[in-house]
Structures are given as structure tokens and as C-alpha cells.
């Protein structure tokens, strides 16, 4: 039940992300300022009390949902969210979860990593011509927007039930 609630929350975040991008497109380029709201969710699972199998599975499904919502190449978000979960998990950043500054910094760095990873995958597999400087500018701007949205997403994730009461999630 807790996993279903997390996945429904992820879908709501994706819909909210799309609505934000649409609303902001009237003022600024939408890809420059729209946050990616599922990245902080995956980061919370990576530094939280989620088992490795559960976290990878939820990251995989959230990535697949993001791929479906984005309408682009299937597998980009799936691979990127699972890899960022594993990278943060292996880095052992669990001790540093406390504090707004860390949440924003971790989200910014992870978003930049995901953006560069997705650019590299697009260059290798799609063979689309891609201007590196404009693409990096987009990655950094979107990472800043995602970092600014990290605090409310982390706060929301803290309030969600993460498992069955009385059962400890082993890591």
C-alpha cells in the first residue's frame, strides 16, 4: 500500500511538473525553468530508509512513468533515475539528509548529473545534432529550478507513510 501511495504521488508530481512547464512557458522557455519533481523523490528514497530492492524498483517505475509522460525516447528517464538512486545510495549520503541546504545542493548536483547523462545517451543512441553550450545552459537552469523545488518535495515525502507500521525496512 505504501508503494502504491508513493507511485501515485510520483504521478501527481509528473502532472504538476507538466502543468508548471505549461504555465511557465508563457513567460520563459519552459525547458529552462520547469523543475523535475521526481528527482527529489528518488533522492529522498536513496538517502532514506528504503531497502535497495524497493528503492530501485520504485525508481524504475517512476522513471518509466516519466518516460511515458515526457513522450520522448523510452528508457532515458528510467535509466537515469535508477542510476542516480544507485549512485547516491553508494555514496552513502544518508548521514547528511538533515538540512535544507544539503537537500538543495544534493538535488542540484544530481539534476546536473542526470542532465549530462541524458545528453550523452541522446548523443550516442539517437544521433541527433545537439548544441553542447545551449544544452548545458538548459541543464544548469533546470537543475536550479529542481533544486528550488527539492525542499517541498522532501517535506512531502517525509509525511508519506513509507511502509507497514511495526515492520522495519532492512537496508
Image: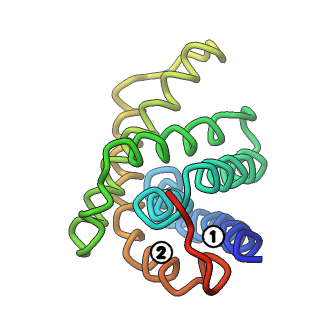
Residue 129: % across, % down: 55, 16
Identify which residue, 161 or 103, lies in the foreground: 161
Q: Which residue is mark 2?
A: 153
Mark 2 to mark 1: distance in Å? Answer: 9 Å
Left or right of residue 2: residue 150: left
Residue 65 appears at what percent x and percent y? Answer: 74, 53
Asked if residue 156 is positioned above or below residue 18 in the image, the reply reads below
Helix, strand or loop under label 2: helix
In the image, 20: left or right of 119? right
Q: Earlier in the sequence, mark 2 or mark 1?
A: 1
Quadrant in which the N terminus appears: bottom right
Decide: marks 2, 1 in contact (CB < 8 A)? yes
* Total residue callouts: 2
Q: Could you tell whether 41 is left or right of 73 in the image?
A: left
Along the viewing direction, whichever of 105 and 133 lies nearer the viewer: 105
Would you name the residue on which mark 1 appears?
13
Residue at 67% in and 80% down: 164
Residue sitting at x 31%, y 50%: 92
Amino acid at each position: 500500500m505504501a508503494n502504491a501511495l508513493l507511485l501515485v504521488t510520483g504521478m501527481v508530481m509528473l502532472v504538476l511538473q507538466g502543468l508548471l512547464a505549461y504555465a511557465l512557458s508563457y513567460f520563459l522557455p519552459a525547458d529552462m525553468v520547469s523543475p523535475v519533481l521526481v528527482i527529489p523523490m528518488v533522492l529522498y528514497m536513496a538517502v532514506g530508509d528504503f531497502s535497495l530492492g524497493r528503492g530501485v524498483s520504485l525508481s524504475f517505475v517512476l522513471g518509466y512513468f516519466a518516460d511515458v509522460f515526457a513522450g520522448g525516447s523510452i528508457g532515458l528517464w528510467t535509466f537515469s533515475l535508477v542510476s542516480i538512486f544507485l549512485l547516491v545510495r553508494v555514496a552513502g549520503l544518508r548521514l547528511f539528509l538533515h538540512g535544507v541546504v544539503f537537500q538543495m545542493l544534493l538535488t542540484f548536483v544530481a539534476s546536473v548529473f542526470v542532465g549530462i547523462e541524458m545528453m550523452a545517451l541522446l548523443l550516442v543512441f539517437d544521433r541527433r545534432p545537439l548544441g553542447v553550450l545551449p544544452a548545458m545552459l538548459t541543464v544548469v537552469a533546470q537543475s536550479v529550478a529542481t533544486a528550488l523545488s527539492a525542499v517541498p518535495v522532501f517535506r512531502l515525502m517525509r509525511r508519506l507513510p513509507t511502509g507497514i507500521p511495526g515492520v522495519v525496512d532492512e537496508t
